Every structure is written in structure tokens, then in C-alpha cells.
Amino acid sequence: MVQQRQIGRAAIVAVTKARGMEVAGAVDSHCVGQDIGMVCDMEEPLEIPIINDLTMVLGSISQSKATGVVVDFTDTSTVYDNVKQATAFGMKSVVYVPRIELETVSALSAFCEKASMGVLVAPTLSIGSILLQQAAISASFHYSNVEIVESRANANIQLYSEDTKYAFSGHRIFHHQMQLKLPIISLTLVKSTIEKTDQQMSWGQVLGEDGVRVHSLVLPGLPSSTTVHFSGPGEVYSLKHDITDVQCLMPGLLLAIRKVVRLKNLVYGLEKFL
């Protein structure tokens, strides 16, 4: 929750500064009653108090003629209910959730289709992370050997997709075929909950049927980083992406807000808009 609040504060500032956008409400269980601008250390108050009742905030915003978008950084367990509430008030949603069950995505997709309501569910809002994934997909068709090294300063920090139902290898990309027709391509590039055995501790954790190894480093001072190493005869091809601050999510967030207002269904993954 600490990281989510950091992202939330950065989002308030980013939206306030963005052309054609403004913050209309703030929901949290902490700092209730305080001005969101002051909580975000802005120079001037926004005259918007933090409220711990989502329904009350949505009801107030819905009375405006402006297009409303709910940005959700909350816990995975509340995503479905939050989207349903936003839809009931005629608002579209941008949901940033690094880990979500595919059953929840499927249920949300069916709900959004029926309601003709746009929702973006994004495992990451980092454009650099998405570009790394796309480059890795392209490279995977040309190299038969691949290993991943990920690092971060704190084991609880996670800004990449953590969905372990996806993996990639030098031979193929694994797609989880859901009953709903969603074009999902995602890579397990970072995995913070690796369970290592005695045999695997010295050489990473094997993910996926093709044996992709992921090496995890957690040391104070390290950036949140992912490096994908491919190798072939006589060469090594490496892709690397570092995250140093939650600000990396803001360009993707603003893009998501601008795009979701035109949707009438659920889209999984910000990469659909790049």
C-alpha cells in the first residue's frame, strides 16, 4: 500500500499539470479530510479533500458534464467492485494492477462488453518496460538461449508485470488462451516471489516449459531493473531497463487516460496503445 500511495501522489501531480485534465476527487483510507494537494506537497491546495467513500466521490463527480475517468491503484481484490461502481456512474476506468487473476480479467471483460464501457487494465504503465517486452518478443524468435536477471533494492517493490501464467523463450511465446477474445501478450520479466530449491539456488529459477531461468538480486541501493540476455553462435544480445522512480509510470498513465475515454470495452495492456 505504501508504494500504491506513492504512485497515487505522483498521479495527482501529473494529472494536475497535464493539458486538458484536472483532478476531481481523491479516495483513500489515510489522511481522510486533508486536501489532496497538500498531501502531495503541491504549492497550492487543490481544495479537494480525501474521502474514504468511493460511492460518494463518484456520485459527486458524475454530476459534472465533463468526461470522468477513475484511476485505480488499489488492491487486486477490489478491482472488480471498483470498476462496477465506476460504470454505474457512467465513468471509465484505468486500472494499474501488476498482478491480477485471469478469471477476474475475463469477468471484467464480459461486464464491460455488456455495459459498453471502456476499461484499461494495465500490468505496467512503464513505457520502457513495455518496449523491453516487445523487443524481447522479437528477439525470442531468433535466439535459442535466454536468461533473465532482475534486481531491486526492496523485495516489496514491483513495477513490472508479475503474472506467472505467461513466460517466453527462445523458441516461442506462451499465450494463455482465455475464453474471452482478448489479444494478450505479456512476459514474465520480473518475478519477486521465486521459490528456489537446493538444486536451483546457484543458477536461477526455471520458469516456463522451455526452461527460462530468472536470477533475482535484492540489495539496498539497487534500481528496479530487468536485463534479458539472449545468446547465439558468436554473439550475446542484451536488453536492459532500469526504473529509478515511480515517475516512470506517469507518461503511460496520461496516455491511458486519454485513450480509455474512447473505449467501449476492456483492453488488457497499455501496449495496445503504443
Image: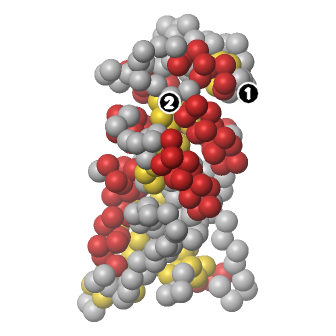
Crowdedness near tag 2: few (<14), some (14–19) or many (≥20) residues, C-alpha within 10 Å: many
- Direction from residue 241 to residue 96 in the image, left or right: right
Q: What is the x, y in percent for residue 239?
A: 35, 67
Query: Which label sits on residue 29?
Result: 1
- What residue is rendered at 50% in x and 81% in y? 212
Question: Is residue 225 or residue 81 the one in the foreground?
Answer: 81
Task: Using the image, determine if residue 68 lies above or below residue 139.
Answer: above
- What residue is rendered at 58% in x and 62% in y? 102
- What residue is rendered at 46% in x and 67% in y? 187
**Which amino acid type is shown beneath numbered disc 2?**
Met
| Dot placed on the residue nearer the N-terminal end, 1 or 2 | 1
Q: What is the x, y in percent for residue 24?
A: 51, 17
Question: Is residue 185 or residue 134 the one in the foreground?
Answer: 185
Tell me how the rendering is colored: secondary structure
Q: What is the x, y in percent for residue 32?
A: 72, 18
Q: What is the x, y in percent for residue 11?
A: 49, 30
**Which amino acid type is shown beneath numbered disc 1?**
Ser
Task: Using the image, determine if residue 233 lies above or below residue 29.
Answer: below
Do the numbered discs 1 and 2 sit on residues whose CB atoms are within 8 Å? no
Residue to which mark 2 is pinned: 91
Mark 1 or mark 2, whichever is nearer to me: 2
- Direction from residue 154 to residue 142 in the image, left or right: left
